[in-house]
Image: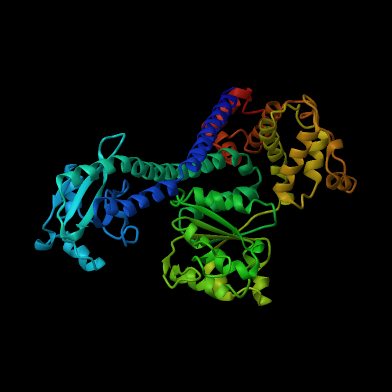
Amino acid sequence: MKKDTDITEAMLGKKRIAELKSRLDRVSQAWTVEDYRALTKFYVKILPKIMGAERCTIYLIEMATDKICSIFGTGLEERQIEPPREGSIVGEVISSGKGVIVNDLDKNKGFHTHVDVETGYISSNMICVPIKSATTHGVTGAIQVLNKRLKGSFTKEDLLQLEEAATYLALSIENIIISQEILRISEQMNREYERFDREFSFDSLFIAESEAMREVLDLASLVSKTPVNVLLQGENGSGKELIARMIHEASDRRDRPFVAVNCASIPEHLMESEFFGYEKGAFTGADHSRKGRFEEANGGTLLLDEIADMPLTIQPKFLRAIQEGEGSRLGSNKLIKYDFRIISATNKDLRQELKENRFREDLFFRLFSVEIPLPPLRDRIEDIVPLALAFLEEISRRFNKKVAGFSAELLNMFEDYSWPGNVRQLRGEVERLVALTPEETVIGPEKCSRELLSHTSSFPKRRSDDTFSGLSIPDQVKSLEVKLIQKALAESNGNRVKAAEALGITRQGLHKKMKRYQIEANS
């Protein structure tokens, strides 16, 4: 009952997070920052004309840093000016929350003098008012209008007019701030959701009754604590990406991006732009700038799947980028710093690729410090039935369908089959069987795929074991646990410490299970 309750709570939690994520996604799409930015630019354009001035600048307080930055201004690029809180008129207006008129700027030195040198403008007089939040009533920024035309001076009426404009502008500024914060929260929520989703759904895939798979998980856990580069070697479908994610999630980079790239799926002529990114106009069709995979993975982990299929032409530049920790986008000379961990995966023999000059030796030794070989499913027979049962439970929940479990004959077939597609194929087979089996019916071999049925005759028949026949999923799990515990106790001559160690659980965990299933130490 406790396990069922935990699963139910986890599922409800997952559902609530998924609903919240969906709402955040919709809100993110609805809050169009560009619309508000366009309106803000309009104010910069129209206010000097209304007030008979030369130019206008709008400043914003960044929520994350509390810095004051110009977001738009006449003849200025975005984020060009950063006035200090103390020692600048804009900073004093934001701190005090009161507007000011200064008609003798050209006679006094200050931060405006520094800005004049940087921008090439000459400031003679100024009017500056705070932008006050429409919701919190705090100050979110400031509007500054410079140089009254015809050598005039700003008046009290100008101040009142600019304060009125600031009231209307506040809504646009507020929406820009909130939109940026919502997007940041949404991105963080997406990462948390993906992490929760992986932690919940990956549990079944980390079943490791076999000694071979336990060694893999132990090694993966060990290397996750250090930033060493790892090579995962194994057949397709053996769980390479899953192990890579496990290493990432157990590392100190777990809160940063995990970026997976399949090197075999990228055309050779797009390799450079895929990894390094490009600037707008770098080539025909580049109508916007784009980050490369190196930038996306910054601070996190980059998984290079099918690394053996990386073209030789890109390998030298790739090697230099990871050695130097920097590179530049296509169409730009600006160097971008990289900081990421590399995990590589392949189903090929890379040493053979080296011999046949299809992979650079220097890149090989730069990328692969630790190699983790993943055994195929046919070499870990002990994991087949537990995996099949875990998949059955998960898929039944997802399909909202109740089946009565596997027949003994079908489980024997699963253990006898060679599974060339490994864990991925087993999951697909269970999914097919759940879909084709009526409710409350025991799953038999008659609905198996053609691949399984065609190979059945080439394997010897096993003695039928009625332990599994007609039992529900929880009963099958219980039956399997009882058999494994009894076997471990028998092999350890009743020594619970050794039995728990063999089962990969704690002594307390073994004691609880023995008590729950009423198993005696000498059984």
- Quarter of the rendering containing residue 299: bottom left
- How is the structure coloured here? rainbow
Q: Is residue 267 left or right of residue 75?
A: right
Q: Is residue 394 visible?
A: yes
Up the image or down, 520 lies above or below 445; here it is above
The one of 227 and 119 positioned closer to us in this rendering? 119
Q: Quadrant of the C terminus?
A: top right
Quarter of the picture holding the N terminus: top right
Q: What residue is drawn where x is 70% and y is 53%?
A: 376
Given residues 467 and 206, the one toward you in this image is: 206
Q: Can see residue 69?
A: no
User: Viewed as shown, does residue 419 lie left or right of 212?
Assistant: right
**Frontmost residue, 232 versus 118:** 118
Number of callouts: 0
**Where in the figure is residue 421, as x and y percent of width and height?**
74, 51
Furthest-right residue in this view:
457
Residue at x-position 74% and y-position 38%: 431
Question: Measured from the top left, where is residue 207 in percent x and y?
Answer: 63, 42
Name, please, the residue furthest toward the left.
107
Looking at the image, which is closer to me, 423 or 488? 423
When the figure is inspected, residue 430 is found, relative to residue 146, above or below; the finding is above
Residue 504 in the image: state x and y as whole percent: 58, 40
